[in-house]
Image (cartoon, rainbow, N blue to C red):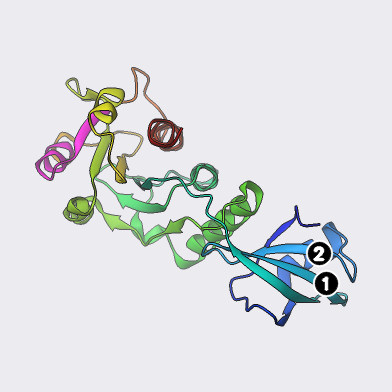
Amino acid sequence: MHQDRFFIPNVSIDSEIWIEGKEAHHILHVKRAKQGNKITLFDGKGIEYKAVVVETQRARLKVFIESSLVVDREPNVSITIAVSIPKGKFSDILIQKCSELGIHTLTPLHCERSVVAIKETSAEKRERWNKIVIESSKQCKRNILTEITTGVAIEDFLKTLCDYDLSLMPCLRRHAMSLKAVLRERPSAKKIVCLIGPEGGFTDNEIERAVEKGCIPVTLGSSTLRIETAAIAVSSMLLYEYCL
């Protein structure tokens, strides 16, 4: 069963631990693990653990941690997507796919035309988003969890752009540069941030303030994309350029 992966945040080598809750249900009643079966655990911080099931009960199981190994499947660039969160299921899709792709950080961004306010990104909602990150990491075999930060107003986020090698702002501005051209001019970028605006796009004022802080307006093509489509597309383009 080493192909089956389960998320356990706190693990110690050469120890026995009880697994309970949702992961226990998955192991016992979906994968139907029995005593003696081997499973793989990961802690979300970069380490995989090989474990063997030593005891099963109706709602929990005990495993012995046999070994650990640092397994790095992360892209060689750190990408942050600061995004005006779309409504409903579309935010879940965005988070799931960006996590699968290997995005380092997702930051909910409040813009002038945002529909979902920062206050709506409640603790309950962020807990659901974190569960989506865990499930997608299990599926795609990532050992590092995408970090979802607290929401921030765009004017405050712009103050952090100096922390990045490259700051991008996809928009429909007439003189926006080709994303391909920008990336080809900056082959050594290692820490990248991309700002994704709301359905109505960034305002001219927001674009001007971003440019003043060093952000580069870029075009993703002639189509007007949904928020989640733009976030997934630009993530894929960045990974293709810098990692493949």
Residue 20 seen? no
Residue pictured at 22% horizontal, 54% vertical: 163
Q: How dense is the environment of label 2, judged by Cα within 10 Å: few (below 14), some, or many (20 and up)?
A: many
Residue sticking out furthest to the top: 222
Considering only vertical position in the picture, is 114 above or below 151?
Answer: above
Q: Looking at the picture, how far across and down is residue 73, in whole percent?
A: 53, 50
Residue 198 seen? yes
Q: Which quarter of the figure has residue 19?
A: bottom right
Q: How dense is the environment of label 1, judged by Cα within 10 Å: few (below 14), some, or many (20 and up)?
A: many
Q: Looking at the picture, how far across and down is residue 201, in whole percent?
A: 29, 34
Location of mark 1 (residue): 53
Q: Assess whether residue 37 is covered by the magenta stretch.
A: no
CB within 8 Å, label 2 to label 1: yes
Location of mark 2 (residue): 38
Q: What residue type is labelled 2?
A: Lys
Query: In this picture, which residue range is highlighted in magenta?
Result: 207-218
Q: Nearer the viewer, residue 166 or 195?
A: 166
Task: Look at the numbered disc 2 and give the secondary structure of its residue.
Answer: strand
Which quadrant, please, contains the N terminus? bottom right
Q: Which amino acid does label 1 sit on?
A: Val
Q: In this view, does 25 lie to the left or right of 206?
A: right
